[in-house]
């Protein structure tokens, strides 16, 4: 099994609802390092997992939809706790959609899975892993 | 599959028995960065994997049982080589026990697995992964 | 010259005023890793720069004043761009005040300087350095 | 499941063939951090996954075959795009061969898998995982 | 004293002349993480050290002049050992020139110093520091 | 001003005397990442700060004097609190001695300063800086 990972980051504001979140119920923010991993069983004809240039570009398109925003005001996330683990799924699902649309190139159709890890600090991070 | 990881650290002394350990047979020590990962298939009602506050607190309770100690003198480890990989299992098993006791909250009963990684330096680390 | 550094972190929301900030004029947020460095010429009677326990505790008291907040609503920062470099100075000045008040112990009176570095991401950070 | 990872690095020159590589078609180079992970179900009689001294030594033997070279001129890679993901497989396969030859010790015969991650920068890395 | 640092990276091939370089006399390569630090005594009217957008853009312009190249073939470096420390000076001097030309904005005219650190691996890096 | 830094590490046991150290008065241990920085005004005839091979070798000779030991039993440190900051000075002074003896090569006689940073964890480190 092969994989390739590229890293980007976003800087967002948000708040959480629920006692479990303690002081994070207040409006605050986070820098999320966003690591997107693409998996496949065999390499393609160019001997790669995915065109790393396209992977970086498409991940960047997704992070720019989220970056420098207050997620509490985003219609997509109305009434939703935008936890680190939830946002990992958002990024992974949007990447999967772009793979299916061909945005990562024809070779990317051989990908079998995506995982996304969001680092919220040097001491906490979360991941979501899915098939393609 | 979702996961959340929190990091803590311990600073311990110990020695190893067996020629395979070379100079590490002498009493020495280590800082272990301790990364505890919690896994589950679906997020809970708060849209999270686990209460990260409780996860941090319970991991801290476990690391404080080990921290600033000479493991050679700990009754729990009498006659045992406290290798990095073994200690990863110790932390993972103790976390699993606390999950089963409800210390990480009712939501944590939906967790399906735990893995623990101990970094002994910038060039070596070890992990243990188990089901819940 | 000796120094000791301890790391903490904060997760805040804020926005900037001024065209130079581009999309960061929108309400967004950041995780800042906060590295506080204490300097002195000679070690104290305990052979240390500063009581690392007190240094961590007092840095933690300062970061908790900022953590999980929207800095745009903090009276201390009314009308101020809370840039990474500015916040580095805020933390350094507050630490200096605590040193002068004796909160870091009598030994800390031998400190000659403080610097604070705030990492806003894996690709950008800022520092402020001052005498004591 | 247990694992142990050791890190080494190589500094190589190479070029790629194929439009997908853009400017990386030119002769350039990379520092690859090389992380080799060894897996097994149960620890051996010394309470370890593998003799970390031998693991480091054998990984070092493999990296020294690649280090400080122009991979375009290596007969083993003639006509091959030496992508990060491909090189991860090269290192993993060579490690597997050494395990089978006994170079990592008799205990290492209990290993069940190897994975190798090559970091080409702080924002991109690739992995290959295989059974033993 | 305030500073702001931004990180970029380059992937280059080169070789060295001189016995002191051992196997690095062969054509090989490196990924250099490039950290550019800008210093000044007081913040500008926007409460910043430098427009981080322009700093990133101009550093990127300089790194793109070096990236994905064999430095042995660059006319600027003919007959020169492109050591990590030398390349740190190249980047710092080119940044200084751009500051003087106004490419980092009018506010950047208040900068008093630049330092550049190039990381060639996780275990070796080099810096050059200069006034403006 | 130029500098070059190389990283090594040690794993030691020790204990501290004095109430300020709290639980660290017990025998415990640490992994110290050891970063040794060499400074000079101008590069030497090979266009470098120091022979990085010799620098690594001599740093390694010094760390091997400390590695895998209980520092409480080392005659050199009898009755001394081997704090992180103190050990940074030990390493720096031993490196300086080797520079003066010519062990880092004739070119190293142009070095003007050394600093050593010891990282005791991901959240604490200490440095010592001296002239040559």
Image: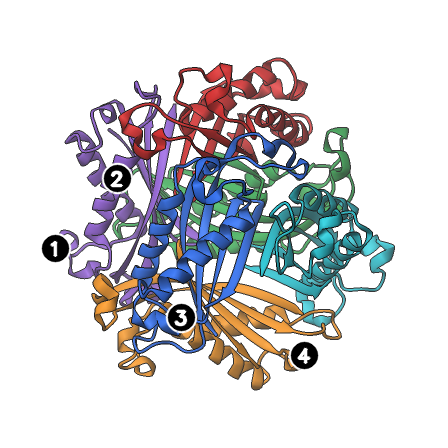
Chain colours: A blue, B cyan, C red, D orange, E purple, F green
Kindly indicate whether the residue at mark 4 contacts the one at mark 1 (C-beta within 8 angstroms).
Answer: no
Residue D97 place in picture, x, y as percent: 51, 83
Mark 4 vs 3, N-terminal side = 3
Task: Please rate how many residues cluster around mark 3, counting C-alpha atoms within 10 Å: few if below 14, some from 14 to 19, many from 20.
Answer: many
Task: State the quadrant of the N terminus of chain D.
Answer: bottom right
Chain at tag 4: D
Residue found at x 21% / y 58%: E71
Task: State the quadrant of the C terminus of chain D.
Answer: bottom right
Res D122 seen here: no
Q: Secondary structure at mark 4?
A: helix
Disc 4 versus disc 3: distance between alpha carbons?
29 Å
Residue A12 place in picture, x, y as percent: 45, 38
Q: Residue D107's mark?
A: 4
Disc 1 versus disc 3: distance between alpha carbons?
33 Å
Chain at tag 1: E
Q: Which residue, given by chain and number where applicable, does mark 3 sit on?
A: D85
User: Which is more toward the observer, B109 or E1?
Assistant: B109
User: Which is more toward the observer, C98 or C33?
Assistant: C33
Q: Which residue, given by chain and number where applicable, does mark 1 sit on?
A: E75
Foreground label between 4 and 3: 3
Mark 1 vs 2, N-terminal side = 1
Residue A64 place in picture, x, y as percent: 35, 45
Foreground label between 1 and 3: 3
Residue furthest right in the image: B75
């Amino acid at each position: 099994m092969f994989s390739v990972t590229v890293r980007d980051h976003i800087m967002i504001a948000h708040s959480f609802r629920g006692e479990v979140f303690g002081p994070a119920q207040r409006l605050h923010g986070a820098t999320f390092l966003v690591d997107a991993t693409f998996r496949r069983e065999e390499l393609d004809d160019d001997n790669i997992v995915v065109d790393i240039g396209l992977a970086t570009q498409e991940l960047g398109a997704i992070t720019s939809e989220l970056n420098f925003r207050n997620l509490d005001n985003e219609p997509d996330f109305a009434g939703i706790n935008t936890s680190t683990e939830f946002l990992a799924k958002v990024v992974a699902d949007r990447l999967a959609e772009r793979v299916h649309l061909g945005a990562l190139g024809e070779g990317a159709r051989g990908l079998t899975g995506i995982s996304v890890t969001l680092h919220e600090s040097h001491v906490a991070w979360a991941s979501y892993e899915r098939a393609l």
